[in-house]
């Protein structure tokens, strides 16, 4: 264990609780996967979406209309949520940059010493994978020369980067029908040595919901933190007849499957809330819902066959924002974001100032009675959501991904797309990012560019990306922003 990590954990252990353990609020973070901003009924953008339980969640608390994730791609975004720190602090800009370093201090490792039982369900995606060439160079150099599909990661090398090694006392992690777990989905303990569970032919969203409610049943009599990572509506698209039958009439088939998967998530949220109600925990549980990034539209939302194009459009939409997953335009990083805590947050309100997924950890740390941690990049949102603090939570929010970088400060957003050019948008008048104001407001652009560069100063590598866009970025910026392809 490295000294920095040791100091943080010992500090948490040394802090006396501010209230009896039974009075500490529970925290549940529910994360959808590739869910676009529009696909929540409360957003009032997509009339075909049916999310009554999530709409109830919004009605019982605060809906953030400018909720942002830290990356338009899943692994970097999840690293920030799990740690409360910009993922670039761990050298993670993109998926091949994982795993999350073992020495990174997660929210679970902060809350556990404060008396919380910490649980993880669903998609993790912070372990090493076959694309992590830099990690292979350090840990398994003999495999670097092999094609990625032939690389193998021994369990002993994987283990330090798993939920169980990162502070989660109980875990049920996996994406489809294969899970590594230390409790059963019916809430019972597993027999000794049984840690891999298979559920052939079953629907992944329902499996993850059952595991989440089982965790609540197992831990309802003590403070808990639960992270639920639904693997939906991310491709490959699948749904059962129960959900598909809710969406009839003519529509793209990929849209029908996405709506069915979103409905399954919505049912899952309803079951989680019912379980809290059964145990009398609604007034003592903060529930946060969001998505890890925007929907991948594949430019034109092609309705390719569901069973033969596993990497196509996932059927979700980002309206009214421009762009999609992988882009630092609004469609890639502005996501649905709800905060519900019965009796403690003003019901049915809309919070319009920009907030970040980085704020989840700082808010949970405050709820646990721990002192504010200077290492965290987010802020405690509760005073802002309650209306007791009128100031904007953040003077600015910054992003960097592939060859793009962006900053939002107040109404202004500066977007750098390397050779694709620079853009300045007034999001109060042009949320669709259709008018580039950079020629009209050069001083604003210069200030934001400087602030963005300073934000990257301590990263490895530092700076705003320069040079060429990759092929995918080139297609995006030509399609959405009419940036001509460079020869």
Image (cartoon, rainbow, N blue to C red):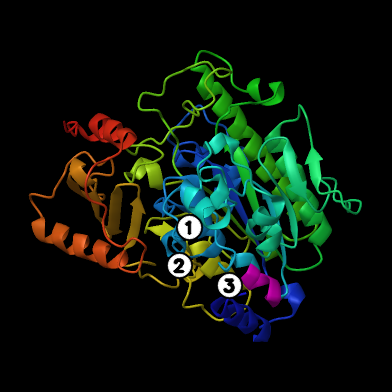
Alpha carbons under labels 2 and 3: distance apart: 11 Å
Question: Is residue 236 depicted above or below 188 in this figure?
Answer: above
Magenta: predominant secondary structure element? helix
Question: 10 Å neighbourhood of mark 1: few (<14), some, or many (≥20)?
Answer: many
Residue 398 in which image quadrant:
bottom left
User: At 26% across and 68% down in the image, what residue appears?
Assistant: 454
In this view, the residue farthest toward the right is 191
Give how far across and how far down residue 145 sits, in percent.
Answer: 50, 42
Asked if the residues shown at circle 2 and circle 1 are in contact, with their CB atoms under 8 angstroms apart, the answer is yes
Q: According to the image, label 3 marks what residue? A: 365
State the residue position of label 2: 378
Above or below residue 109? Residue 231 is above
Q: Earlier in the sequence, mark 2 or mark 3?
A: 3
Is residue 172 visible in the rendered image? The answer is yes
Please give the name of the residue rendered at 46% of the width and 27% of the height, measured from the top-left corner. 313
Q: Which residue is mark 1?
A: 357
The answer for how far apart the CA atoms under marks 2 and 1 are is 8 Å
Q: How many marks?
A: 3
Secondary structure beneath dot 3 equals helix
The extreme top residue here reads 250
Find residue 419 and report its horizontal and vertical position in percent: 19, 43
Tag 1, which secondary structure? loop
Q: Quadrant of the N terminus?
A: bottom right
Estimate the spatial distance between the alpha carbons at disc 3 and disc 1, rounded to whole Å.
14 Å
């Amino acid at each position: 264990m490295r000294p920095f990590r040791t100091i943080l954990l010992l500090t948490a252990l040394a802090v006396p609780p501010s209230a009896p353990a039974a009075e500490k609020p529970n925290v549940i973070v529910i994360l959808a996967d590739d869910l676009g901003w529009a696909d929540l009924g409360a957003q009032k953008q997509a009339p075909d979406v049916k999310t009554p339980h999530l709409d109830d969640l919004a009605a019982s608390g605060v809906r953030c209309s400018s909720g942002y994730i830290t990356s338009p791609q899943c692994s970097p975004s999840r690293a920030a949520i799990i740690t409360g720190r910009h993922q670039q602090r761990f050298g993670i800009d993109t998926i091949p940059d994982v795993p999350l370093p073992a020495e990174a201090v997660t929210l679970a490792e902060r809350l556990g010493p404060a008396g919380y039982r910490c649980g993880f369900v669903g998609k993790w995606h912070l372990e090493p994978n076959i694309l992590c060439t830099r990690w292979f160079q350090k840990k398994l150099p003999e495999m670097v020369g092999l094609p990625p599909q032939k690389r193998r990661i021994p369990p002993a090398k994987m283990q330090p980067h798993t939920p169980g090694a990162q502070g989660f006392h109980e875990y049920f992690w996996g994406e489809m029908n294969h899970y590594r777990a230390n409790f059963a989905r019916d809430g019972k303990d597993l027999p000794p040595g049984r840690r891999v569970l298979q559920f052939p032919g079953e629907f992944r969203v329902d499996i993850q919901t059952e595991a989440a409610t089982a965790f609540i049943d197992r831990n309802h009599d003590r403070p808990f933190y639960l992270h639920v990572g639904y693997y939906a509506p991310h491709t490959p698209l699948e749904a059962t007849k129960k959900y598909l039958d809710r969406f009839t009439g003519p529509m793209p088939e990929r849209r029908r499957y996405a709506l069915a998967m979103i409905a399954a998530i919505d049912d899952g949220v309803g079951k989680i809330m019912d379980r809290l109600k059964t145990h009398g925990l609604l007034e003592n549980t903060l529930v946060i819902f969001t998505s890890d990034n925007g929907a991948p539209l594949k430019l034109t939302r092609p309705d390719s066959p569901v069973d033969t194009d596993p990497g196509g459009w996932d059927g979700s939409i980002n309206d009214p924002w421009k762009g999609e997953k992988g882009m630092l335009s609004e469609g890639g990083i502005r996501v649905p974001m709800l905060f519900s805590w019965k009796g403690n947050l003003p019901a049915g309100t809309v919070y319009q100032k920009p907030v970040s997924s980085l704020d989840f950890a700082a808010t949970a740390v405050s709820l646990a009675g721990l002192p504010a941690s200077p290492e965290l990049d987010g802020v405690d949102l509760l005073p802002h959501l309650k209306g007791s603090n009128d100031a904007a939570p953040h003077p600015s929010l910054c992003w960097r991904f592939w060859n793009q970088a962006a900053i939002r400060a107040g109404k202004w957003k500066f977007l750098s797309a390397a050779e694709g050019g620079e853009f300045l948008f007034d999001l109060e008048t042009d949320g669709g990012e259709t008018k580039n104001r950079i020629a009209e407001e050069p001083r604003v652009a210069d200030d934001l560019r400087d602030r963005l560069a300073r934000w990257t100063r301590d990263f490895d590598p530092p700076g705003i990306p320069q040079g060429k866009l990759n092929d995918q970025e080139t297609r995006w910026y030509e399609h959405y922003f009419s940036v001509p392809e460079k020869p």
